[in-house]
Amino acid sequence: MLFNSIPFLIFFSVVYLLYWAIPKEFRKYFLLASGISFYAYFSLALTIHFLIVISINYFLYRKIQSEPTKFWIGLTVSLNLINLGFFKYVYFFSRVLADVTSYPFFAQVPNLIHIALPLAISFYTFQVIAAAVDTYRNPNLPTVKVEDYFLFVAFFPVLIAGPIMRMSDFFPNLDKLTPNKEKMYRASYLLMSGLVKKVLVADPMSLTISPVFNSPAEYDSFSLFIAGICYSIQVFSDFSGLTDMARSVALFLGFETPENFKAPFFSTSGRELWKRWHITLSFWLRDYIYFPLGGSKKGELRTYLNLIIIMTLGGFWHGADYTFICWGFYWGVILAGERFLEGKLGLKLTPEKNKFLMVIKAMIVFVLFSISGLMFRSNNASNMVDHFHGIFTHFSFSLEQLLVGSQNEWLVSATSILGDGSSFRYLHIENLERIFYTSFAVLLFHHIQYVPESWEKIRKHDVWLVPVLGVITIFLLATLSQDGGEFIYYRF
């Protein structure tokens, strides 16, 4: 049951009306039943698996609290990683073994074993591991009741694609489940924001760039490069739009959830970017992998290695493919490189006063992000290689004619090493006007987040603005339900 579907609109409308109609003491039980129903709509069999996973984790949580030993925390983390690894990575590792050994059996694994990926397994795995580690680090925290723990994991607004909740984010909400006008206003704005990002930015941009990524060998260099820029706009609008909608649904039910995006494309360094992009994942990787590996306390070389490790693992968490591993490794190298430049060479990568330099560096970081988007979006490793190769070779005009004309045949042959000699052979990206208006929309959303005063000015007009936005929201919901594509992060 996806957010951009009529079944979800019906489901949430019923849940919302009943939720506030029943007595307060029964609301969390009703939400738990709603969360299980939400999951069961996806797959009844996998719902049983989901409930078993939660039950085992609650048992282990109680054991960790009563006996905070390395055995129990190690067992908890191991079991959850095995569960995630089996469902998400068996096919990938069989493919790797097939590539390395050329043994036919490994190539046949997908035909021998049919594995359905459980809904939200990547997100809830990180969530229960965080709960276990936090309890291990501080076993004196108040004991969580079994029904509260189940609700913590099965809370449907953030189940599919985050934000990744921690116990400290979630449980304080249970004492505040009362209607609140301020929350309703913010929920309305977030819903509108998410729908605009999805309907007016992400989906149109997807239509523009999908042909390029599906057949990179057919497009010219300019189109292949611009596709990376466009994908950055699409994935931000799609994922932050999904997060806005998830936070909106949670707020309508009285729950505060962490913010996951804070104007990431205004970042002036890679380090700052990952404090603004998918914030809950970045902090999860920091707190539960980077710090346990030693963080920055075991020397510079170890710090560089730790950064590369956590970002590569973060890439692998996103998907079981070489493309995601390359994406994570790429960012690990950038973060390690930034630390080297700042720590060893004394270069200041984040200017504080010079606005011109801030704009230039933000543009550089955005281009670096867009390059990584080519890896993230590519359908497979072969397409990724074709895409990067095409950027440097697929010239719309043949390179040799552009440089030397048609008379110097020996030089024509030499330059053909870079270009293939064919003029006007490659396709061009279409609907460039979409790129301009969607880029403007993304800049507007970034400005609102980056300059708090602009948000405060908007909030002064709640009385008339919220009803107007409500009408627009109904229109966008209708558009989304009929024509909207799947959110990118539903796959993870």
Image (spheres, rainbow, N blue to C red):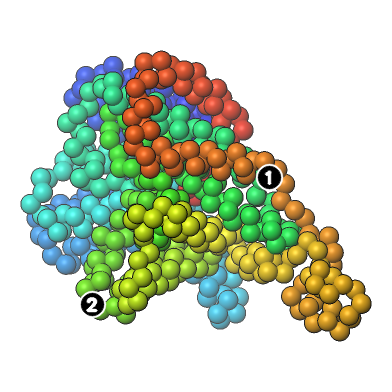
Q: Position of residue 266 (x, y in %)?
A: 43, 50
Query: Residue, x 62% and y 42% (percent of image)?
Result: 436
| Residue 6 appears in view | yes
Instruction: Report the residue that reaches farthest toward the bottom.
Output: 410
Category of crowding for the residue at label 1, using alpha-carbon neighbours closer than 10 angstroms: few (below 14), some (14–19), many (at least 20) = few
Under circle 1, the secondary element is: helix
In this rendering, would 430 be left or right of 334? right
Instruction: Report the residue that reaches farthest toward the right.
Output: 407
Circle number at residue 432: 1
Residue at numbered disc 2 = 298
Q: Residue 345 versus residue 245: which sits nearer the camera? A: 345
470 above or below 216? Answer: above
Q: Position of residue 232 (x, y in %)?
A: 53, 51
Amino acid of disc 1: Leu
Spatial CA distance of label 2 from label 1 is 49 Å
Query: Residue, x 53% and y 73% (percent of image)?
Result: 96
Q: Position of residue 368 (x, y in %)?
A: 50, 62
Q: Residue 123 versus residue 227: which sits nearer the camera? A: 227
Query: Residue, x 37% and y 73% (percent of image)?
Result: 341
Residue 466 sits in quarter: top left
431 above or below 179? Answer: below
In this rendering, would 258 be left or right of 42? left
Query: Residue, x 32% and y 77% (percent of image)?
Result: 344
Amino acid of disc 2: Lys
| Residue 319 appears in view | no
108 above or below 129? Answer: below
